[in-house]
Image: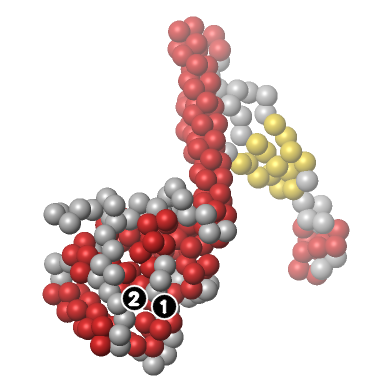
Amino acid sequence: MQIIRRSKPYASIHYLIRLTDDRTKLLEYKRFKNLIAEIQVRTILQHAWAEIEHDIQYKSIDTIPVEIHRRFMSLAGMLEIADREFQAIQDEDINLRKNARLSVSKGRFEDVELTPDALKAFLDRKLGSDGRMSDFSYEFQTRILKKLGFSNFKEINECIKDLNADKLNKILWPSKQGQLSRFEYLLLTGMGKYYVKYHPWSKEKWHINMCKRDLEKFIKAGIKINNYLPPSKTKSD
């Protein structure tokens, strides 16, 4: 495979590719043996640049006013800087997520921001992994945690640290429930009335009744309800 870089400013990358000899030995690929294909790779901003370039730069240089040509070249530089910054932001985001997962997996909860990735690492460590859970499930649960008033995993750990998810699960169900369901039992028991009060569904009668029913079962089974209140909330809220 060969890479060709165009010499014009803010260029895309072109790849010239062909099938390997081993592949072209197969009957269905034999007809492509001497075929070379070109793949052009560019960002969205590079695509926008290409559209502008097609309309302006491909005209005769003598027909483009000097001022327009100067601004055109300046724009190319700004788009390239923007592209690099977008890439830098993406790289930093990946590193932050990676470091957060690593910190949580090692039990270092201090100042780890609530993100779906970090939540998955936290729950995998606490409750065991669950391949049934989707990325959306962790995103949704993260939003709920923030609504409940949690800011980091140290607070969550403080809320549920003395509770047993499997024991709570057995009180409610004969079979083991999913990771996030068992986590909700921990939160309900850890926060008690505050879980009901600050939950996004706190105005929904069915949710209130469900929480009260589960709390009654926990109390009847001898489980202590902690009524933990995250620091961002006050009892007067």
The image quarter containing residue 42 is top right
- Identify the element where label 1 is drawn: helix
Q: What amino acid is at disc 2?
A: Tyr
Whole-percent x, y for residue 227 in the image: 25, 67
Crowd tier of the residue under label 1, counting other residues whose Cα lies within 10 Å: few below 14, some 14–19, many 20 or above: many
- Return the x and y of residue 222 as percentages of the image width and height: 30, 85
Q: Which residue is drawn at 30% across and 77% down?
A: 224
Foreground residue among 82 and 159: 159
Most foreground residue, 140 or 32: 140
Q: Residue furthest bottom?
A: 174
Mark closer to the chain start, 2 or 1: 1
Where is 99 relative to 81, above or below? below
Front in this rendered view, residue 86 or 216: 216
Q: Is residue 33 above or below residue 224?
A: above
Q: Specify whether residue 136 is in view.
A: no
Is 60 displayed left or right of 123 in the figure? right
Q: Please tell me in which quadrant of the rendered image residue 159 appears.
A: bottom left
Which image quadrant is residue 164 in? bottom left
Look at label 1 and name its amino acid.
Answer: Ala
Left or right: residue 204 compared with residue 25: left
Q: Is residue 230 left or right of residue 212?
A: right
Question: Can residue 213 be spotted in the picture?
Answer: yes
Q: Nearer the viewer, residue 54 or 216?
A: 216
- Residue hosting label 1: 165
Residue at numbered disc 2: 185
Residue 114, image x and y in percent? 41, 53
Separation (CA) of disc 2 from disc 1: 7 Å
The residue furthest top is 66
Asked whether disc 2 touches disc 1, contact meaning CB atoms under 8 Å apart, the reply is yes
